């Protein structure tokens, strides 16, 4: 049970600052199967790294399926490593360079068997891999000016490169890295917000053993739609309020929690996800918009934020969408 001396405001403030804490309760679950990396889920790490000219680091593929084509340093995480460790390893193996992460840049999912974590990073050592050092990981690496013709393995990396450039030019959200906190499942701790006509800010809470930010669990295994992280958000929201009256939007994530040092037991991830709720236009005429949507389950309740400092921080992040982008590819 959460320390009763720690207030809801304290917990939200911690999440907004990119920190985290262990999940104590689960409010909605498709299943509670433990995550086992490389067995029932796959995490992919990717790095966007620029030099002083804003050329981007690229590696030439050695795999037969995409031989001699170019891509960002990327690959599947292995057992016994954190997300950042996986990213550093892939960059070192494929480019010969050591790096340090600046921030998690974005997260993409295509079902539980494919979640990609893209980092903006910077070189900290090593030497660029040459053709004389070619191996099964890559043939060579180089800096690409993003203008010269280059045979790409796939064009899906172009938006990632653009996201890195935008972040360099204008910090879109505070630099944020994964927090070392274990989880055995794929889940999301939701910061669900509603702003009424009086500009009061409300948060959705779970009412289990104590009041808490609600947590929804995603399934693993076959990439059925019901296992998507995006679907898990909708499932919890459907359990507590009439979706015919409201629009629910995932704004992004404040950060995530992962450990990965005890395979099969701590391979899970908790995403701290920002959600906004608004009344649909057609519902405004028939509901009282000065109050948050009526809840249909005693498992949840609305909580009015009275701390003006916290309210301002949440509103600023909502208005500017200064959170890490979180995209579902389905």
Image (cartoon, rainbow, N blue to C red):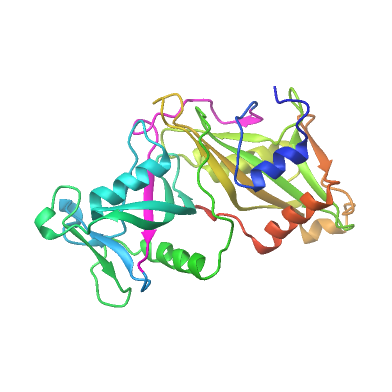
Q: Identify the image quadrant of residue 7.
A: top right
- Residue 58: x and y in percent read 28, 62
Asked whether residue 296 appears in the rendered view, the answer is no
Residue at 51 percent across and 71 percent down: it is: 169
Residue at 57 percent across and 43 percent down: it is: 231
Q: Which residues are magenta?
A: 26-51
- Residue 269: x and y in percent read 50, 36
Seen from this angle, which residue lies furthest bottom?
Answer: 147
- Along the line of sight, which residue is nearer the eye, 186 or 59? 59
- Along the line of sight, which residue is nearer the eye, 43 or 294? 43
Compared across the picture, whether 224 is left or right of 188 comes to left
Residue at 74 percent across and 39 percent down: it is: 10
Residue at 77 percent across and 44 percent down: it is: 203
Would residue 257 be counted in the magenta stretch? no
- Residue 311: x and y in percent read 79, 52
Would residue 38 be counted in the magenta stretch? yes
- Residue 273: x and y in percent read 61, 46
Placement of 188 over or under 252, stated as above or below: above
Number of labels in the image equals 0
Compared across the picture, whether 237 is left or right of 55 comes to right
């Amino acid at each position: 049970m959460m320390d009763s001396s720690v207030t809801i405001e304290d917990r939200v403030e911690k999440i907004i600052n990119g920190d985290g804490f262990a999940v104590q309760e689960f409010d909605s679950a498709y299943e509670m199967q433990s995550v086992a990396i490389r067995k029932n889920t796959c995490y992919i790490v990717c790095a966007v790294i620029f030099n002083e000219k804003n050329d981007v680091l690229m590696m030439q593929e050695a795999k037969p399926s995409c031989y001699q084509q170019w891509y960002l340093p990327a690959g599947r995480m292995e057992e016994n490593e954190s997300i950042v460790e996986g990213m550093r390893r892939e960059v070192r193996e494929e480019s010969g360079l050591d790096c340090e992460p600046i921030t998690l840049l974005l997260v993409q999912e295509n079902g539980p068997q494919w979640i990609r974590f893209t980092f903006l990073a910077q070189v900290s050592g090593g030497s660029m891999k040459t053709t004389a050092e070619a191996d099964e990981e890559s043939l060579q690496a180089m800096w690409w000016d993003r203008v010269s013709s280059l045979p790409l393995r796939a064009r899906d990396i172009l938006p990632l490169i653009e996201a890195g450039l935008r972040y360099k030019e204008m910090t879109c959200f505070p630099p944020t890295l994964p927090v070392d906190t274990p989880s055995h499942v794929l889940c999301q701790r939701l910061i669900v917000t509603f702003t009424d006509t009086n500009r009061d800010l409300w948060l959705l809470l779970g009412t289990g053993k104590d009041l808490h930010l609600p947590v929804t669990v995603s399934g693993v295994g076959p990439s059925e739609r019901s296992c998507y992280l995006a679907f898990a958000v909708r499932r919890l929201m459907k359990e507590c309020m009439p979706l015919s009256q409201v629009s629910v939007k995932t704004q992004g994530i404040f950060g995530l929690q992962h450990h990965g040092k005890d395979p099969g037991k701590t391979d899970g991830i908790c995403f701290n996800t920002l959600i906004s709720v608004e009344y649909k236009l057609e519902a405004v005429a028939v509901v009282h918009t000065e109050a948050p949507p009526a809840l249909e389950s005693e498992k949840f309740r609305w909580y009015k934020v009275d701390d003006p400092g916290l309210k301002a921080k949440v509103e600023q992040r909502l208005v500017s969408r200064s959170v890490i982008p979180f995209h579902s590819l389905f």
